[in-house]
Image (spheres, rainbow, N blue to C red):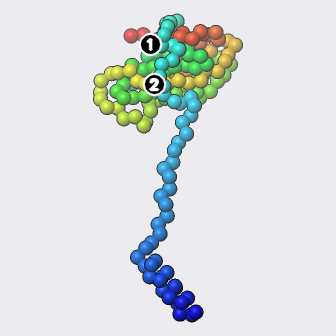
């Protein structure tokens, strides 16, 4: 019996020689996108019948990322920029006050620009909280336009060209 146990022990040891166990690689971290920071590639209600109702204020710094059009789409604002190349916009709702709404607009760092020409960027869609009065919409800490409480879908504010 001892001999049998010894033989099994030797077989197990011999079978394990040269074989090392390595831990399984950890899965790559996946960042959950914020609901309001998701670029939109598909059409929206505003594609059918856009109506310009006002002008966007120009940014103080012309090099700053700035939309050329912002439109109401349901309970959201859609930010558009017409000069990029494989770029996508991302927006974040930073804060809501009685008389203002603050957004940050940025380009998606996961998309690499592929040229230096100007083509429309993928627009961004951010939540538009309900309001009872007029509010100033700020983008990247600069006042962009005045938003009425009852702005209908497809109401757009455009940059002066």
Q: Nearer the viewer, residue 26 or 34?
A: 26
Q: Position of residue 149 (x, y in %)?
A: 65, 11
Q: Is residue 4 visible?
A: yes
Q: CA separation, marks 1 and 2? A: 22 Å
- Of badges 1 and 2, the one in the foreground is 2
Q: Nearer the viewer, residue 57 or 86?
A: 86
| Residue 78: mark | none
Dot 1 corresponds to which residue? 159
Q: Quadrant of residue 109?
A: top left
Q: Nearer the viewer, residue 13 or 30?
A: 13
Helix, strand or loop under label 1: strand
Q: Residue at x 59, y 29 (%)?
A: 94
Q: Is residue 62 visible?
A: no
Q: Residue at x 44, y 82 (%)?
A: 14
Dot 2 corresponds to which residue? 41
Q: Position of residue 90 (x, y in %)?
A: 49, 29
Helix, strand or loop under label 2: loop
Residue sticking out furthest to the right? 132
Q: Earlier in the sequence, mark 1 or mark 2?
A: 2
**Depicted 104 relative to depicted 47: above or below:** below
């Amino acid at each position: 019996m001892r001999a049998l146990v010894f033989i099994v022990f030797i077989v197990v040891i011999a079978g394990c020689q040269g074989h090392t166990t390595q831990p399984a690689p950890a899965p790559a971290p996946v960042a959950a996108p914020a609901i309001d920071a998701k670029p939109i590639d598909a059409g929206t209600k505003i594609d059918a019948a856009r109506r310009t109702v006002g002008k966007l204020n120009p940014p103080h710094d012309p090099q700053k990322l700035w939309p050329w059009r912002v439109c109401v789409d349901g309970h959201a604002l859609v930010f558009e920029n017409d000069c990029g190349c494989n770029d996508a916009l991302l927006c974040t709702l930073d804060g809501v006050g009685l008389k203002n709404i603050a957004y940050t607009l940025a380009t998606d760092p996961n998309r690499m620009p592929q040229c230096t020409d100007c083509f429309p960027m993928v627009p961004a869609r951010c939540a538009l909280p309900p309001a009872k009065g007029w509010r100033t919409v700020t983008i990247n800490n600069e006042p962009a336009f005045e938003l009425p409480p009852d702005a209908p879908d497809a109401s757009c504010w455009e940059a002066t060209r």
